[in-house]
């Protein structure tokens, strides 16, 4: 019998409050719920299920967390999951039964574990080794990363003014948001573009915050005309899970502080509405970690991204070592 109950949108604020008390451990799931409460994004089809009174406490599972075609995506969180020993086979069996009852997930088909705590990943891996779940699928680590959370000042200074002071844009550039018209340009340059279709990206750009830098056109007096008619040269965005990312600057425009300016501008916008400001940085990407720490982010909690695919699946998930952004 299915132990999960699907939550309606009106139920989400209460769930968000419960998850907020468990930050930063709950950050991956909290961010998705917070985005759904604030922005909707019903078009992306994410569903939220909760199971109470399980051997692992209250269990929250989100399915279709990205639009990767032909691959099921999900993430999950339970406050008590890390208190059970991964070597405990009876606990692993209970965990398998719980996962098998998640509506819509077929464990014989490709699965993308989208930003889960390592303790959950380890349990799933043991179930695969035993043949209990994901039998016949090949494993690939997409990323082992940490969440970096922006930390507000504790010295009484006005954080908003401090952020504004740090945004220094050269005079031949202008700031604006990304729009659906920029989808092809941005998607084609995104390291993780296998995980979202261009159609989903258009929806994301139309609903979620983003910031981009554009070169000013000397022939145009209206900056808005410039940003409508020309592609951006640097940008960052909010993902559907609430993280900031997909930060990129065209090579010929680097070393001008553009990535810093777009990051600070989006940081300011997101923090203004009260959402946590966070990014995910691959554990081997020391340059990205240093960049974000200098701005005011602090490493807070580990997460993993993993995929299980059929042995003959040709989908490309080979990533260079850089931030998931």
Image (cartoon, rainbow, N blue to C red):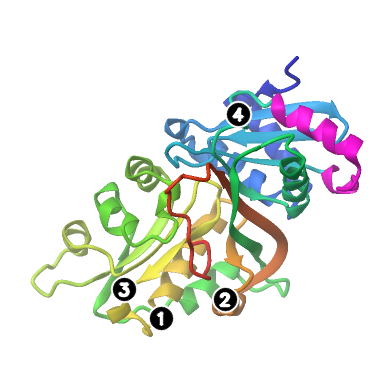
State yes or no: discs 1 and 2 in contact (Cβ < 8 Å): no
Q: Residue at x 55, y 78 (%)?
A: 291
Q: Quadrant of residue 137?
A: top right
The earlier-in-sequence mark between 1 and 2 is 1
Q: From the viewer's perspective, is residue 50 above or below residue 224?
A: above
Q: Which residue lies under the disc numbered 1?
A: 257
In the rendered view, does 109 fall on the left or right side of 266? right
Dot label at residue 105? 4
Mark 1 residue crowding within 10 angstroms, few (<14) / some (14–19) / many (20+): some
Q: Could you tell me how far apart the alpha carbons at marks 1 and 2 are, in whole angstroms?
A: 12 Å
Q: Could you tell me how far apart the alpha carbons at marks 4 and 3 are, in whole angstroms?
A: 39 Å
Element under label 1? loop
Q: Nearer the viewer, mark 2 or mark 3?
A: 3
Residue 9, horizontal then vertical, whole percent: 58, 27
Q: Which residue lies under the disc numbered 3?
A: 250
Q: From the viewer's perspective, is residue 240 above or below residue 8?
A: below
Q: Residue at x 71, y 60 (%)?
A: 302
Residue that protrudes farthest toward the left in the picture: 219
Question: Is residue 52 something one can see in this rendering?
Answer: yes
């Amino acid at each position: 019998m299915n132990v999960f109950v699907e939550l309606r949108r009106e139920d989400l604020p209460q769930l968000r409050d419960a998850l907020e008390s468990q930050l930063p451990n709950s950050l991956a799931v909290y961010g998705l719920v917070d985005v759904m409460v604030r922005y909707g994004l019903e078009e992306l089809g994410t569903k939220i299920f909760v199971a109470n009174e399980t051997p692992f406490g209250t269990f929250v599972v989100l399915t279709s967390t990205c639009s990767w075609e032909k691959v099921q995506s999900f993430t999950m969180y339970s406050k008590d999951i890390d208190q059970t020993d991964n070597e405990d086979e009876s606990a692993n069996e209970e965990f398998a039964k719980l996962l098998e009852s998640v509506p819509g997930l077929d464990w014989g088909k490709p699965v993308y574990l989208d930003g889960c705590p390592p303790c959950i990943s380890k349990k799933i891996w043991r179930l695969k080794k035993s043949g209990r779940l994901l039998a016949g699928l090949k494993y690939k680590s997409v990323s082992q990363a940490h969440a970096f959370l922006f930390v507000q000042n504790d010295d009484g200074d006005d954080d908003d003014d401090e952020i504004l002071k740090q945004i220094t844009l050269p005079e031949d550039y202008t700031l604006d948001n990304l729009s659906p018209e920029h989808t092809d340009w941005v998607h084609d340059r995104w390291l993780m573009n296998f995980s979202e279709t261009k159609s989903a990206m258009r929806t994301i750009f139309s609903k979620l915050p983003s910031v981009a830098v554009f070169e000013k056109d000397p022939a145009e007096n209206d900056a808005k005309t410039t940003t409508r008619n020309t592609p951006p040269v640097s940008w960052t965005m909010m993902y559907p899970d609430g993280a900031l990312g997909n930060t990129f600057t065209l090579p010929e425009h680097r070393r001008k502080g553009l990535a810093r300016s777009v990051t600070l501008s989006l940081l300011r916008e997101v923090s203004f509405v009260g959402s946590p400001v966070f990014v995910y940085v691959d554990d081997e990407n020391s340059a990205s970690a240093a960049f974000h720490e200098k701005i005011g982010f602090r490493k807070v909690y580990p997460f993993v991204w993993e995929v299980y695919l059929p042995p003959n699946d040709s989908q490309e998930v080979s990533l260079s070592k850089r931030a998931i952004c």
